[in-house]
Amino acid sequence: MQWLAANWVQVVVPVLAVGATYAVGLWLRRILTQIFENWAAKLAWEGRVSQLIERAARRPFLFWFLLLGVFIALEA
């Protein structure tokens, strides 16, 4: 506990970097999903192609932002 009290900045900054990057990823994913849905509605794709594309990109998008957050945390 003494080490943590003395070096709390070395722990908090990377944790905040990962959390902030993940939050930005969630926010950006929501915005890009809305943009894609509007674009797909204008094109009037038949079937469920637009839903398939959206679902395929949904999880990896957050994984990339999580990796980016870990990279930023390691650099900090």
Image: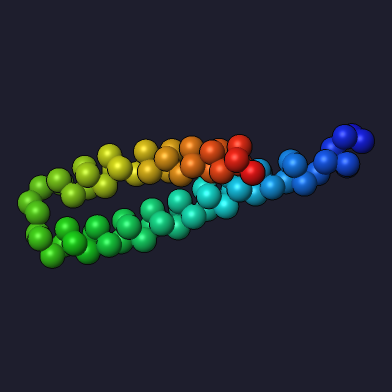
Please state, as top left, top right, bottom left or bottom right, where the N terminus lies in the image: top right
- Which residue corresponds to the image point at 24% horizontal and 59% vertical from the top-left? 37
Give the residue at the far front of this rendering. Answer: 75
- Vertical side of 6 occupied by 34: above or below: below
Quadrant of the rendered structure where residue 45 is?
A: bottom left
**What is the x, y in percent for residue 54?**
26, 47
- Vertical side of 70 occupied by 34: above or below: below
Quadrant of the rendered structure where residue 44 is?
A: bottom left
- Which residue corresponds to the image point at 54% horizontal and 38% vertical from the top-left? 71
Give the residue at the far right of this rendering. Answer: 2
Horizontally, is 33 left or right of 53 in the view?
A: right
- Vertical side of 75 occupied by 40: above or below: below
Can see residue 66? no
Instruction: Please tell me which residue lies in front, 19 or 3.
Output: 3
**What is the x, y in percent for residue 10?**
75, 42
Horizontally, is 43 left or right of 59 in the view?
A: left
Can see residue 61? yes
- Which residue corresponds to the image point at 64% horizontal and 44% vertical from the top-left? 76
- Give the total of numbered labels: 0
Horizontally, is 24 left or right of 57 in the view?
A: right
- Which residue corresponds to the image point at 41% horizontal and 57% vertical from the top-left? 28
**What is the x, y in percent for residue 38?**
22, 64
**What is the x, y in percent for residue 19?**
59, 48
